[in-house]
Image: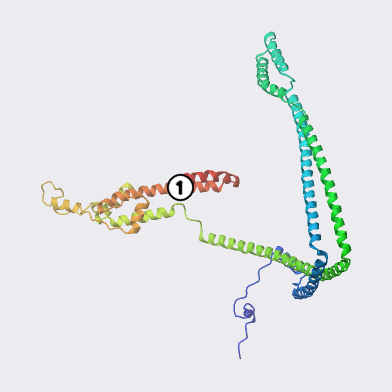
Amino acid sequence: MAPKKDTKKDDKLDKDGKKKVAPKPISPELKALMEKEKAIEKVAKPDKTGLDALEAKTKEETSGLEAKKEMLQKKITARTGGSDGFQKAKNELKSKLDEYSAAIDTLMKQKDALYGTMDATKAEGRAKKNELQDMKKKLGFESLEDVDGQIKKLEYEMSHSSLTIKEEKKRIDQIKVLKKMKPQVQKVMGMSAGVDEASITTSKASIGNIQEELKAARDAKKIQQDAYRKLMEEHKAVNGDVPALFEERNALNDQIRAKYTVLKAKKDEFYAANKLYNDYEWQVRQIRNDRGRIERDIRNAEWESKKNEEKEEEGPPPAPFAMDLLTLEQTMFYLKTLLPKEAVEVVVEKTEEAAGVLVQKKDRDDEFFFAPTKGPRSAKGKKGGKKAAATAAPKAKAIVHTMDSLSTFDKYKLTIPAKTDMVSDVIGEVEKKIAEFKKKQADKVAELERKAKLTPEEKAAEEPKEAAEEATA
């Protein structure tokens, strides 16, 4: 018997055998935009084929009418052109009319300019008069005698009245102001107010002369117009059938205009339909842009949430200068590996003594720089002294550093030990650097804790100061 199929397990898989993913919930704003897009009435894009066909047909039909009109125009030109004498007389009269028209236009412009000058002169006179009145009111004096009289009055009060120091100082200040005001009063008194009557009189005389010239030019133009009208009437009387030709030409123009009117109506209809379609497309595009923006914001929010979760999983960020301290500690280890074995024991011994470690009596023999022998320990003429001294002072060896080590020494301004006897001093430099960076780390942590407690306004106020300090550094 075949085993039963696990339907519950199959419900959790899709047709490809992959685990089904539950659909993400749609935000109310996104759902509203989707409903809004559905509610917009769809507009089909208008077909331009019919319009193109009508335009081609109209051009073909009007081209035939234009050809007929051109032939008719040639007939009209031949009939209305007349003899050379008519054309010559017509051109001469037309030229004279144009000359008189140009002369009249020039005179009219000159007259208008003179009227404008007169108006400007009058306006300037009124402005000067008003300015003078305003300055007099502002100064408060009509003449220099008034200013001097006020100064004498204040000086008299100071000489013959018992005034307090404050009142006397006030009058001194008033006298200073009045003395400074005297040049202004004198300037105002010297200003003239009123309209430049001489200029206006000259302008009026010029306008009178121009009007006389205008009258003469207009009378001469009227004579030329009468002659031109008479010439045209005589020519028209000779060519009596020309009006029929004009009517036929006008009829052709009407037919051409009617066909283009139909074409224009179709174009307007197409453009109106195309505008509706473009408006529909614009609305849909706007909604889809808004949807894209919302979906992008949702993705960004999910990404930020995921990023924050990853940050929480990663734990707190490393302390400031942690890499520097790690590099210095690795450098310390590297330097200790360069020490001779005996020197390493001495360094350990010194470190334990500095830390206050008391070694047991049975282990104190290990504290010596070298192991004692059976012979005498001193080198003062006794046997084995020179050999012991040679053992106590091992020969310094040259050190070959890697490029990484050299770059580390250079970065932290450390002495590069060329031989093993220089390593101990460099270890001291590294210890100082470690202590220096530990202090920097503590200061930086304290500064970060202080900034974390600041308000946004206080942070914004400190930003320019920090930027200036960074630029200076």
Tell me if I can see residue 360 in this picture: no
Q: Quadrant of residue 373?
A: bottom left
Query: In the rendered view, would you say 108 is above or below 172?
Result: below
**Quadrant that contains the C terminus:** top left
Residue sitting at 53 percent across and 43 percent down? 465
| Rendering quarter of residue 50 | bottom right
Q: Is 110 situated left or right of 314 in this image?
A: right
- 446 left or right of 97 in image: left
Outermost residue on the front side: it is: 85
- Asked if 77 appears above or below 349 in the picture, the reply is below
Q: Position of residue 251 (x, y in %)?
A: 86, 69
Is 204 drawn above or below residue 395 in the view shown? Answer: above
Along the line of sight, the residue nearer the viewer: 321 or 229? 229
What's the residue type where badge 1 is placed?
A: Ala
Point out residue 249 in the picture as x, y percentages from the top left corner.
84, 69
Name, please, the residue furthest toward the top.
160
- Tell me the residue at 73%/67% (across/down): 278
Say which quadrant the N terminus sits in. bottom right
Horizontal and vertical percent position of residue 276: 77, 67
- Which residue is at a point 78% across and 46% down the rendered structure image? 103
Residue 397: image x %, image y %?
A: 23, 56
Name the one closer to the observer, 224 or 255.
224
Q: Which residue is mark 1?
A: 442
Q: Would residue 246 be seen by someone viewing this image from the given angle?
A: yes
In the rendered image of this protein, does residue 37 appear above or below residue 397? below
Residues 15 and 117: in front is 117
For residue 193, what is the image quadrant? top right
Residue found at the far bottom of this picture: 1
Q: In terms of depth relative to the viewer, which is nearer, 316 or 196?
A: 196
Q: Secondary structure at mark 1?
A: helix
* Colouring scheme, one of rainbow, by chain, secondary structure, one colour: rainbow
- The local crowd at label 1, few if under 14, some if 14 to 19, many if 20 or more residues have their Cα within 10 Å, is some
